[in-house]
Image (cartoon, grey):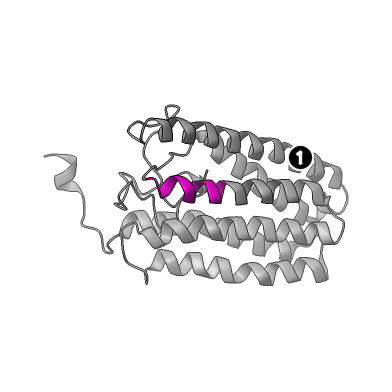
Amino acid sequence: MTTTEHRRPSTFGPSALATPANALTLARLLATPVLVVMVVLTGPSSWLLAGVWLVCAGSDGLDGWVARKQGTTRSGAFLDPLADKFLVLGVLAALASIHEVSWLPVVLIGAREFAMSVYRAFAGRRGVSIAARQTAKIKTLLQDLAVGLALIPPVGLHHVTIVRILLWIAVVATLYTGLEYLHDGRRLLAGGGSAAAGGAVGSVSGAGDGGDVGGGAVGPAGTPGPTGAAGSSGLA
């Protein structure tokens, strides 16, 4: 019996909006301003802040798992990386506002994410989907680790230098993956989007970079990708 015959039918189609995966993603998006205010008022570090961060960051993997079980959607592929970037940049900005970290790495990460979002839209309008590389997962992991360590009292209160060094490493990885994405995009645009770039597998239409896409990957004509996953915190 083939794999296709074993595959369970999706609960939701690619155009669905009201899905459990999207609800989890929306909850993460709405929780971000609350966490940001908590960091500004009670930060830089506490076990409460670390716990809330862990729940918010962990929900990314959960909504991706739910999406793969119930069906990937275009709305989820858009919302999930948006929520991830909003969470990371929001907390980093809060930490910078209370002088826990410098504003420069936060601005560099934010500028890269904005530029890649614009580039994805540009490529998408030309029918090109740029697959995420494995390095995007590493970039997202470094960002999440830097934020998480900043919120944990033993590190954030007494060893903040570790956080700052790790954040700069995350900046380097973030900029590097941005250059990779631009390179792959140029190759695909030059070739009409007919081949995968740089050995990356699958296609991601609305996804960001680095994680399980809550709504799943969406292929070139808006069809669900083969796995419904794009990596670990949105990919680009």
- The answer to which quarter of the image holds residue 2 is top left
Left or right of 55: which side holds 37? right
- In the rendering, at what x and y percent does residue 146 appear? 72, 47
Which range is magenta? Answer: 116-126
Q: Residue at x 65, y 55 (%)?
A: 88
Please name whichever residue, 151 or 136, is drawn nearer the observer in this view of the structure: 136
Compare residues 123 and 198 and report the one nearer the observer.
123
Left or right position of 154 against 5: right
In the rendered view of the protein, which quadrant contains the N terminus?
top left
Q: Which residue is mark 1?
A: 168
* Chief secondary structure of the magenta portion: helix
Residue 44 visible (yes or no): no
| Total marks in image | 1
Quadrant of the rendered image containing residue 46: bottom right
**Is 231 above or below relative to 60?**
above
Residue closest to the eye, 147 or 184? 184
Q: Is residue 124 visible?
A: yes
Is 197 rendered above or below residue 123? Answer: above
Q: Furthest-left residue in view?
A: 1
User: Which residue sits at x=64%, y=40%?
Assistant: 174
